[in-house]
Image (spheres, helix red, strand yellow):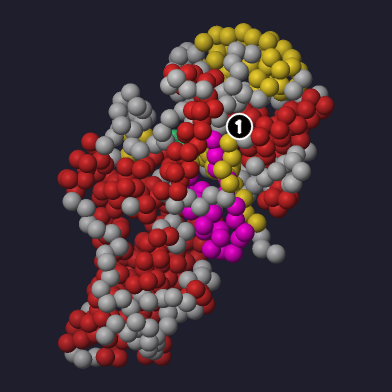
């Protein structure tokens, strides 16, 4: 049986249209799923929406809709957007799904049976947009530490989850699983800011709004956010339902991908809920950084929001994905600029990759009537061997980086192979070999170029699947055994196969000023 791999994204609030930050999380999860699949795993990806809560109730009202009408509309939009972005998720969970609501009630009942929940009075500083209470000491300049907005002092009757009861177990878990939260600096933040000072019990119910799952023992209380939201990762697999086949197969999750804003909830409350349920804890939580603009966060009021559909419709899905995956390095924030976007696409996609393919296909057509020449390993010289050794060494590095989800660095190393292969053309000067009628050298060089392009196409498959496919077609590769990850090492491109006569460029070169203007004018 193949090893399973379960990756999740956060379930997003359906407050409005998504921006490229949300799209990044989705693209990252999708590319990791595809990478794992290519490495032979039975990979499963979950995404969805977090549909309850006061904020949704308020937004729906302002639009003259019921909350259900509003969330249905956004769910529809989200599914269309992810289809446009070629996101290969396996399940889309909505917290209003009956399967979720039923399972959550059972989960809460289990907490009640365990004695994990008690009724109390909550007084705290509440941030409405974040739906989170903060203690006095957590506020930054008297404002919400997460979003910087005003907070309100509130007191209400609430149910609490007894987090303190699990504190020692949580600390022990972290000691035994030092890699649980990535990057490490995020783990250290959680530790020094929240675990070391002592855990606060978590308020899990509200009486001030309606749009949510009722507390089973006390229906005037509505569950709010984290019990309802975090449990999606298990309810989607059928936990506590009649059919828990998927749960048995995929739990514990291999990777929860989240933004840095919600790492605290995933790093503290989620493991504790799972301990309370007697379930295994996920293997890893990866918190990526934020996409910000030069003038701070993207926001509709500033009109600086970049919507993914705008980029995809004009530049294509693979180019947009590549930009996002390449520009956000492990756990760090990234400042989006139209200049950076256009430059990255021109340099890496149109120049480096596009030209390498174009030049190679052109030369194979010109010198060998489009037929990939015979492989002649015995006649290779130092330059050829250098290229091969370099590529093999890179592959080891790339696997290490991708296995630890350092996607941007992995892409950088893949592009180093592209650069090295372009350099090989300069070193071997095929045009001079043609002039000298040195057919033997020329055929070795063409073979090696085609072979490296095959390897490159495989390496980019999880990240730029459409582009990889176009490359295979242009190179005349139809045999699926030539496209597997293992075939990078275990196979070589077939000789005698015909490449395309005139390939379309993979990426058109962008007119810099025009495109910068275009992106700027289309921010919302
Ligand atoms: O927090 N850059 O939902 P949410 C990068 N419902 N990623 C960004 C981003 C940005 N500027 N802005 C948002 C919630 N994200 C809860 C989650 S999970 C059980 C419940 C991404 O709609 C990032 O992944 O506020 C972040 O964690 C998520 O969207 C927050 O989405």
Specify the quadrant that holds the C terminus: top left
Give neighbour class at mark 1: few <14, some 14-19, many 20+ (Cα, 10 Å). Answer: many
Q: Is residue 170 above or below residue 495?
A: above
Q: Which residues are magenta?
A: 26-49
Q: Residue 40 magenta-drawn?
A: yes
Q: Is residue 499 above or below residue 405?
A: below
Which residue is tagged 1? 96
Please give the name of the residue rendered at 61% of the width and 60% of the height, measured from the top-left corner: 41
Taking depth in this image into account, of 227 and 427 the one nearest to the observer is: 227
Whether disc 1's CB lies below 8 Å from ligand 1 is answered no
Q: Is residue 17 above or below residue 358?
A: above
Give SS at disc 1. Answer: loop
Please give the name of the residue rendered at 19% of the width and 81% of the height, measured from the top-left corner: 431
Q: Is residue 470 above or below residue 127?
A: below
Quarter of image, res 2: bottom right
For this view, does 217 lie left or right of residue 497? right
Residue 241 location (% of width, % of height):
74, 41
Q: Residue 178 magenta-drawn?
A: no
Quarter of image, res 361: bottom left
Taking depth in this image into account, of 460 and 106 the one nearest to the observer is: 106
Q: What is the number of callouts on the image?
A: 1
Specify the quadrant that holds the N terminus: bottom right
Q: Is residue 498 visible?
A: yes
Residue 443 location (% of width, % of height):
31, 86
Residue 268 location (% of width, % of height):
64, 32
Residue 463 location (% of width, % of height):
44, 56
Please give the name of the residue rendered at 77% of the width and 20% of the height, measured from the top-left corner: 217
Q: Is residue 423 visible?
A: no
Please give the name of the residue rendered at 74% of the width and 23% of the height, measured from the top-left corner: 216
For this view, does 363 lie left or right of residue 84? left
């Amino acid at each position: 049986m193949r090893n399973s791999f379960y990756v999740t994204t956060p379930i997003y609030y359906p407050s409005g249209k998504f921006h490229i930050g949300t799209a990044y999380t989705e693209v990252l999860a999708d590319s990791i799923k595809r990478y794992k699949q290519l490495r032979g795993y039975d990979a499963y990806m979950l995404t969805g929406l977090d549909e309850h809560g006061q904020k949704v109730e308020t937004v729906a009202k302002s639009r003259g809709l019921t909350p259900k009408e509003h969330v249905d509309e956004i769910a529809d939009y989200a599914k269309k957007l992810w289809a446009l972005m070629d996101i290969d998720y396996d399940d889309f969970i909505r917290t209003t799904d009956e399967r979720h609501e039923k399972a959550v009630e059972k989960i809460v009942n289990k907490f009640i049976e365990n004695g994990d929940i008690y009724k109390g009075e909550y007084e705290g500083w509440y941030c409405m947009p974040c739906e989170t209470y903060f203690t006095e000491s957590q506020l930054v300049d008297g404002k919400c530490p997460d979003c910087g907005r005003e907070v309100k002092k509130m007191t209400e009757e609430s149910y609490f989850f007894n987090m303190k009861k699990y504190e020692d177990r949580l600390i022990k878990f972290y000691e035994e699983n030092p890699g649980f939260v990535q990057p490490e600096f995020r783990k250290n933040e959680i530790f020094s800011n929240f675990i070391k000072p002592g855990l606060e019990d978590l308020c899990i119910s509200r009486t001030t709004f309606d749009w949510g799952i009722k507390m089973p023992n006390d229906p005037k209380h509505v569950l709010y956010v984290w019990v309802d939201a975090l449990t999606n990762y298990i309810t989607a697999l059928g936990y506590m339902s009649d059919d828990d086949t998927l749960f048995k197969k995929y739990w514990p999750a291999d990777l929860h991908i989240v933004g840095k804003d919600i790492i605290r909830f995933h790093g503290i409350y989620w493991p504790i809920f799972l301990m309370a349920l007697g379930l295994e804890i996920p293997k890893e939580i990866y918190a990526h950084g934020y996409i910000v603009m030069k003038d701070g966060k993207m926001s509709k009021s500033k009109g600086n929001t970049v919507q993914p559909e705008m980029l995809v419709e004009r530049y294509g899905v693979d180019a947009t994905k590549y930009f996002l995956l390449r520009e956000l390095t492990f756990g760090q924030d990234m400042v989006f600029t139209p200049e950076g976007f256009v430059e990255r696409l021109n340099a890496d996609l149109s120049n480096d990759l596009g030209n390498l393919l174009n030049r190679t296909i052109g030369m194979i057509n010109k010198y060998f009537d489009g037929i990939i020449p015979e492989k002649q390993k015995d006649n290779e010289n130092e330059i050829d061997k250098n290229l091969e050794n370099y590529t093999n060494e890179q592959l080891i590095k790339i696997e290490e980086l991708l296995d630890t989800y350092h996607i941007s660095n992995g892409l950088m190393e893949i592009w180093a192979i592209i650069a090295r292969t372009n350099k090989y053309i300069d070193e071997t000067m095929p045009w001079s070999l043609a002039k000298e009628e040195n057919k033997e050298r020329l055929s070795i060089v063409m073979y090696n170029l085609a072979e490296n392009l095959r390897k490159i196409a495989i390496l980019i498959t999880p990240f730029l699947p459409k582009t990889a496919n176009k490359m295979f077609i242009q190179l005349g590769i139809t045999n699926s055994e030539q496209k597997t990850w293992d075939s990078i090492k275990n196979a070589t491109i077939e000789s005698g196969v015909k490449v395309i006569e005139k390939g379309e460029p993979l990426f058109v070169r962008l007119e810099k000023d025009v495109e910068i203007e275009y992106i700027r004018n289309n921010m919302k």
